[in-house]
Image (cartoon, rainbow, N blue to C red):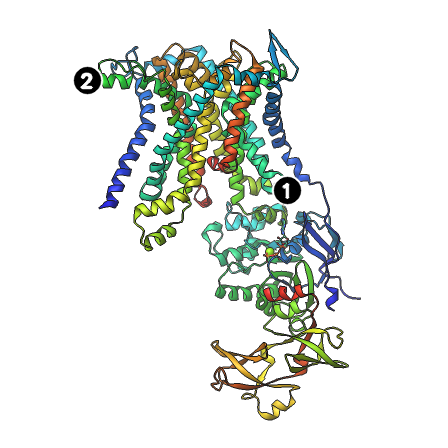
Amino acid sequence: MEETPAIKLSGITKWYGSVQAVCSVNLDIRQGEFFSLLGPSGCGKTTTLRVIAGLESPTAGRVYLEGEDVTDVPPYRRNVNTVFQDYALFPHMTVEENIYFPLRMRKISRVEARPMIQEALALVNMSGFEKRYPHQLSGGQRQRIALARALVNRPKALLLDEPLGALDFKLRVAMQKVLKDIQRNVRITFVYVTHDQTEAITMSDRICVMKDGLIHQVGTSEEIYNSPSSIFVAGFIGDMNFMEGVVTERHGDEVVVDVNGFIIRSGRPMGNFVVGEKVMVCVRPEKICAQDVCNLEDMQRFDNRFQAVITRIVFRGNDYEITVGLGEASMRLIESASDFKGENEGDSLYVGFLKEDVLLYPLQAEEEKTHEQLD
Amino acid sequence: MNSSIENTCPGPKKSWNRALLQGLPIFMWMLLLILVPLAIMFVTSFFVKEGVQVVHRLTLRNYLEFFTNPIYLPIFFRTIFLALSVSLTALLLAYPLAFFISRKVTRFRSQLYMMVIVPLWISYLVRIVAWRTILGRVGVLNSLLLALGLIREPLPFLIYSPFAVYLTLIHIALPFVFISVFSSLEKIPSNLLDATSDLGANSFQTFRHVILPLSMPGVVSGFTLAFVIALGDYIIPQQLGGLNGLMFGNLIVSQFGYAFNWPLGAALGFIMFAVAVAILFFSQKLGSSEGFLE
Amino acid sequence: MKRTGTFSFLRTYSVLVYFFLYFPLLVVFLYSLNASRSTVRFEGLTLAWYSRLFHNPALLEALFNSLKVSAVAVSFAVVVGTTGALFLNRVEFKGKALFRSLSMLPIILPGIIVGLSLLVFFINLRLQLSLWTVMLGHMTFTTPVVMFQVLARLQRLSRNLENAAMDLGAKPHQAFLYVTLPMIKRAIVGGALLAFTMSFDEIIITFFLIGTTNTLPVYLYGMLRFGLSPEVYAISTIVLGFSLLLILFMARYTGTGEEIYGKR
Ligand SMILES: Nc1ncnc2c1ncn2[C@@H]1O[C@H](COP(=O)(O)OP(=O)(O)OP(=O)(O)O)[C@@H](O)[C@H]1O
Ligand SMILES: [Mg+2]
């Protein structure tokens, strides 16, 4: 028997008037895990979080906290707290009063509360800021106060809505570490909303990828990175080459695709394909090897090998991104600066990759294709 | 695998929002103090007074009266003309001032701004007292001119004339026009002006081709507001207008005085309402005038 | 230079406009101090006219009536205007823009139409004209004044604040009391002060609805029928000064507390 999930969403659907925000979301979030909701803007992440917090009641579906149905329980009786994207610190209260607020709602006296407030401030490394007002704090400091305020009651789960969205890059990286450390210390379930895939991959135990109110995939970072379940996920997480092709043969798990006259073998078809079907061929740039890097024997083990013309070389600091043409289509690959042999645009290059690294997705509606490219 | 990602969820649900209860007081206010009175005024305007009785039968007699009785139309047009003159003059006074404070002044900007709008909401009646004092036959202006030897007799047209009404209404309307113009001037991004002068425009060209067109919304709304203020006033004409200065508003009020023909009053009131709403609507002032209260 | 030419022209022009705005008010003030009963000659300073006012029972009654009317109209506006603002800020509904425009009507329509329509309404209801009908008349414009001030404030606040309070365990009424109310307090007070000044000074609507009693402006208006007198100037100055005080206080009170909560 599995343990009861900390948070369980079953068939959650939310309409704002005639706008659909989330659609039949089913999720099990485990006790103490760092769970991320990842997706582009408007995909329903905030809505999902607000439904969990009780700030929004779902149009359909049930919400369970530790096995208990809380769908009709108001937010102030749910033992989960939220860190809002804009922090939502009360501007007319000092840091101390802000953190005291949830305790005060539980009728804890100021005297009793003092050590709890101190502890919460220490946890986020903000001791000594008690008397400041929010407008006297920097963005990162406000963020940490919001965190302290949400944690002081020791909720069963902490919901964070893009908590680092407003911070600059350096501070964001630093705060990611702070957050992760805090999560390890307090062992509270974190539900973390972000649209930054790197952030999600580096921090989370598991990730849920959403788009247009639908869940596309739930899994660990590796699962999602290595076997994305849809074209959208494949493109959203990490870098990916997309090429359209037509199925020419299939032998069991191996499918052969014709991309502009180049034959590509795939060992990972994500669906049941028939010969003649149009498909999307996906290969990650870092899985493609160029001949000057791999020696010839290495080259031999690749199921897919081509002679291709370099159309573009971009220096990116510690590596080069090289684009080669495959007929109409093109493919990018990455070469580290130390391996780079000084090729020029127009040179031809021998490239190879394993069939296991080639993913195939069905190309259904024409519209979906354009959709992906826009994203 | 892919086929599992499908939009298969229940449709939207109509739910009675409990928050609507919170809207009840304001809806009742709107209904009972604005909409219903206006509607009743409208209906009443189709009744007629016969003898001392008000006959509850719908007829267009009051409106016919307005168009055929030679008293009403001339005064109506005189009022429109006066209102136009007032708005135009107020605009001519307010625009340079707004431009000066918005674009030329660096110190004491907010104080200078406040000084124009403080009179906005206060002392309507006091201003009437003031202008009567200034314009009176033996008032400040006449005394001054006499003392300076510029005139030998007090100027007769200063008070109890359309001129006195005109001047006092400008005094009332000016701050409104100022705010409208000022806020639209403030909305013009200064980098736009930098760009214009960068492109070689001199300051007059900048004003003519950039500032003036971009401040047009403020000009229009200020003008409209001044027009509506002047259109409806009846106290100032009563106090400073004399016989020649009587305005449409006075005709309306008089239906509630000795004549006590309130159906006719309602009809005249509705005509004014229609004019005011039409012009507010066309300048779209209705939507954008909340700024005054902020 | 041309530029400085424009500048000094604009400056002179502006000074003249300010003179136009303030000279009349100054005249009233000066005449209220004139020792002569004649309003024409100036014969030295006195405060006699002011002290005389305090022995005029009719005037005091009018003043008292004015205060009553304004107090009731403003209290109503605070309650209805504030709930209205909260409602408009929170709830989306069809015709909201129209509703907002309609709420502006009592302020931008000529007062004569508001007064007239209410009078016709009350006549039809066979309602006796009294201070009560005046109060109803004043509620038409005090309410949107408060409402739009509060609404403007609410729209600058993050909607998450109230959510955050509930999320942290506050019941709806606690969230309102501890979080929302302190943040819109200044807007409410500011709106109330502005509404009070407008109401205290109002005559156009009042005139229609007053019946036989007096408010201060109506009393002053009645005096004006007998011509200008030192008492008129004294009353005018008091009304002017009082309104000015309220408005300046309001400007200071609401103007400063935008983000600077800490500096209280
Ligand atoms: N109160 C609301 N009324 C109407 N539509 C809403 C409301 N809140 C959200 N939506 C819509 O619901 C959809 C999902 O919104 P949501 O805020 O959950 O997205 P999100 O994933 O959090 O996006 P972001 O990354 O931009 O914050 C969007 O299309 C949005 O426009
Ligand atoms: Mg969001």
Indicate left or right for B250 with B111 as reference: right
Q: Residue A96: x, y in percent?
A: 52, 50
Q: What is the residue that sits farthest to the bottom in this orientation?
A: A297
**Tag shown at residue B149:** 2
**Residue A69 higher or lower than B40, as above or below:** below
Indicate left or right for B215 with C101 as reference: left
Mark 2, chain letter? B
* Dot 2: element: loop
Q: Quadrant of residue A246?
A: bottom right
Mark 1, chain letter? C
Q: Amino acid at mark 2?
A: Gly
**Residue A232 higher or lower than C97, as above or below:** below
* Dot 1: element: helix
Q: Amino acid at mark 1?
A: Pro
* Residue under pointer 1: C172
**Residue B155 higher or lower than A120, as above or below:** above
Q: Nearer the viewer, mark 2 or mark 1?
A: 2
